[in-house]
Amino acid sequence: MSGKGYGGNIPDMIKGLNLKWGKRNGLVLLGLLLTVVVILAWLVKGRLDLEDPWLEVPEKLSANGPKTTFLIKAGDRISGLREIKITLKQGDEAEKAVLTRAFPPGGEAGATVEVPVTLDLKALGLKDGRATLTAVATDRSWGNFFNGRSTRVTRTLEVELTPLGLTLVGISHLLQAGGSGLVVYRVSKPPKETGLKLGNRLFQGYPLPKGNPGDYVAFFAVPLENPGSLSAEIVARSFGGSEVKQGVPLKIKPKKWRQDKISLSEGFLRQVAAAFPDAGQGDLLKTFLEVNRQKRQANHERVQQVTAASTPQPLWQGAFLRYQGKPMARFGDRRLYIWQNRVVDEQVHLGEDLASLVHSPVPAGNRGTVVLAEPLGIYGNTVILDHGLGLFSMYSHLSQMAVKAGDQVDKGQILGRTGSTGLAGGDHLHFSVLVHGAFVNPVEWWDAHWVRDQVEKVWAPGPSPAVAAQEPPAKRKGPAPKKKVRKIRRGP
């Protein structure tokens, strides 16, 4: 039978049917394929996140007491958060889980999550000291082999279960205006910062040489004014941020300072203008006042910078050597500068001026480390020694210097030679002593009796006479014996 009666042969008919079916269903398949691609793209969009989640943990963490609470924040811009985990580790102990929070809900893409964290220190078995807190935020991405991308933050946690304690041990019992003093005290555990606070100034404390663990000593400068009595505080701050104070009443022996009138000559003003050309004001007197005020202040700021840090143990031993020169200007002198019969300026002299032969050798007052050997404005060529525990000595107006910063020098070693550099009217040595950057009376440190009674005996092992004097006297029959008070022998 022929297929012609059907309008064509059978193969051609099958091809036509297949073509119609293929076009129609091809479009359907293409549509399905596109839909699947769109769905996959939508599903994969957040999972191919190439950004790490963000995580905020407070920079400073401290725990004062059995519990502490703080807040952390986290989020992920593209895939959202999956988990936040916090752990703690102290010393050689195993890491301990503190908190694990899984999302959802709340960890959607772009959302900020706030998680309050409460640490029960005793339950965690922590002790006083430092611990390491680690926080990890993980997102929902397919990064890290489908485990999600993570951000890790570590912080030091200062743990303080027991508060600091202070105990007074000893005080210098003969304090004079403008002089030096020291206090010895005991801290129950290592502090972050400690010392004696006078007004707004903290005189740093150091571990007591040859003392028991927890014993500290702080040298301090007695103000030049004559208050009669002064309130001070021993201060200790813990690594956890807490602070403990103990008041220390100080009885100050007043001192009457000399008044020194200095008549300015035109020749001297010209000498000053030539020595300090950068201070030129177009007027001799104005130039002198610029040097005597602004440069003096700048020089003192430089001294403060140099004496800000000190060796934490004493380098000196016994009284300081005194340069064998005639005393001229004295420490604490109230200087009045006279020009054309009127007072044009006032300054306080903060050292001892000693004059001898021109260009005489200058010995180191005691063993120490050179922390400055350079020109210092009004003080001219100057050497400053660090003797440890905040004690420094200063040698100025030198014609030449024989040491450099960093040198270790022995007591009596030659530092240089006297001169008239800086704001000096003639060849001499200007000698100063400083306690934590504050100028104090050098005469005390020349006095072997003062050093022995007011320093060495105060920090020696055993109870201090100053502490014993503060204790209430025991009841006794009959009149109390008279107390013998030794007078401090002054230096020459």
Image (cartoon, rainbow, N blue to C red):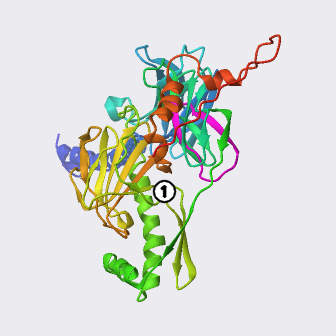
Instruction: Find residue 346 and report its image quarter.
Output: bottom right
- Residue 459 covered by magenta stretch: no
> What's the magenta region?
217-241
Vertical relation: 55 (above or below) 351: above
Residue with the most extreme bottom position:
282
- Quadrant for the N terminus in the image: top left
Taking the image as shown, residue 404 lies to the left or right of residue 78, namely left
In the picture as drawn, the residue positioned furthest to the right comes out as 478
Residue 92 vs 142, above or below: the answer is: above
Image location of residue 51, percent across then percent down: 38, 44
Nearer-the-camera pick, 456 or 163: 456
Question: Image point 60% across, 14% down: which residue?
Answer: 123
Which residue corresponds to the image point at 66% horizontal and 51% vertical from the top-left?
226
Please give left or right for residue 24 compared with residue 400 in the image. right
Residue 232 among those drawn in magenta: yes
Q: Amino acid at mark 1?
A: Arg
> Is residue 190 at all visible to an observer of this figure?
no
Say few, some or many: other residues with alpha carbon within 10 Å of mark 1 (under 14 / 14 to 19 / 20 or more): many
When asked about the image quadrant of residue 93, the answer is: top left
Residue drawn at the location 48% of the way across and 27% of the way down: 456
Asked whether 363 or 484 is in front, the reply is 484
Q: Which residue is mark 1?
A: 330
Task: Judge from the rendering whether residue 86 lies leftward or rightward of residue 121; answer left or right.
Answer: left
What residue is rendered at 24% in x and 42% in y?
Answer: 413
How far across and down, in percent of the image, does residue 114 sit? 59, 38
Q: Is residue 15 above or below residue 134?
A: below
Q: Secondary structure at mark 1?
A: loop
